[in-house]
Image (cartoon, rainbow, N blue to C red):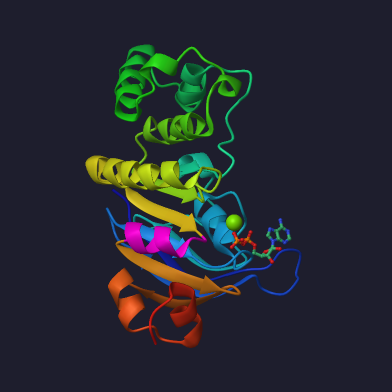
Amino acid sequence: MSKVELRNISKSYDKQKDVLNGIDLCIEEGEFFVLVGPSGSGKSTLLRMIAGLEDISGGILKINEKIVNHVAPKERDLSMVFQNYALYPHLTVEQNILFGLKARKVDKQEQQKRLKETAEMLGLTELLKRKPRELSGGQRQRVALGRSVVSHAPLCLMDEPLSNLDAKLRANMRVQIRRLQKQLGLTMIYVTHDQVEAMTMGDRIMVLNDGKIQQVGKPITLYNEPENLFVASFIGSPK
Ligand code: ADP
Ligand code: MG
């Protein structure tokens, strides 16, 4: 498990105006934490900073009590799932799932053990020899999840992983992702612009608008006690 702390985090691209400002946040071990906000509010930027894929302009980022501002992505012991799946088109499902383990020189026997367990968990056993183009959108997304699960990283970051799927599949995948997160005891930071997804999946939710935190709390608290009009209208509370 993994704890993530952000202290006064800010970000500007090329010295332009801040796209994130004064972000203070502590995500507990084993928590399913949702970042929600409209397009352009800074969700992906924040997630990419936690992953180490984007420089931090100001503030301190800690993972497991350790300051990681300048720690390389592969040293952070986390996995990330992207919106567009980012599968390698020329590799099979099996090769896509094992890619990260090969790069980290996990031994062959351990690779096969994890592959088997991951494929079973996600219903991919019959699809291992296929290429991404021979899969449906939902199957591709399960491969992307598999690549994250197989890493055994205690911290998982997901950036709008379901936005390319149809409504029915999305509802089904929400349940699968929650189940996986519980079963594996992952700390999850999950980005979405979908209020329903946020409300149904999050232990806690952070609402972001224009680079600033609007409110952090349990879904029921945000619904019943929105701290401002933005939260109220975004979450759709009666007030
Ligand atoms: P979200 O994921 O919530 O849609 P983003 O984090 O992608 O928001 O973007 C936040 C803001 O930062 C937007 O105004 C966007 O245009 C800007 N932005 C994102 N990436 C870059 C980049 N590489 N260079 C310059 N500006 C960027
Ligand atoms: Mg985004």
Please provide the residue range marked out in magenta.
193-202
Left or right position of 8 against 176: right
Expressed as whole percent of the image width and height from the top left, the position of residue 128 reads 44, 16
Q: Tell which quarter ligand 2 is in.
A: bottom right
- Residue 2: % across, % down: 32, 51
Asked if one can make out residue 77 in the rendered structure from this viewpoint, the answer is: no
Instruction: Name the residue located 48 percent from the left edge and 43 percent from the top edge.
Output: 80
Q: Residue at x 35, y 29 (%)?
A: 122
Residue 218 relative to residue 69: left or right: left
Location of residue 51 in the rendering, given as x and y in whole percent from the top left corner: 51, 50
Q: Quadrant of residue 196?
A: bottom left
Report x, y in % for residue 1.
28, 48
Which image quarter is the C terminus in?
bottom left
Tell me if residue 237 comes above or below residue 43 in the rendering. below
Q: Nearer the viewer, residue 227 or 11?
A: 227
Q: Judge whether residue 227 is colored magenta.
A: no
Task: Tell me if residue 173 can be seen.
Answer: yes
Q: Is residue 187 above or below residue 215?
A: above
Tag count = 0
Image height check: is 99 above or below 53?
above
Q: Nearer the viewer, residue 60 or 210?
A: 210
Which secondary structure is most common in the magenta stretch?
helix
Tell me, yes or no, whether the highlighted magenta stretch contains residue 197: yes
Taking depth in this image into account, of 61 and 87 the one nearest to the observer is 87
Q: Residue furthest front?
A: 168
In the rendered structure, the answer to whether residue 222 lies left or right of residue 179 reads right
Question: In the shown orientation, is residue 234 left or right of residue 18?
Answer: left
Against 26, residue 118 (above or below) is: above
Q: Residue at x 36, y 17 (%)?
A: 125
Say which residue appears at 48% left-offset and 56% top-offset: 191
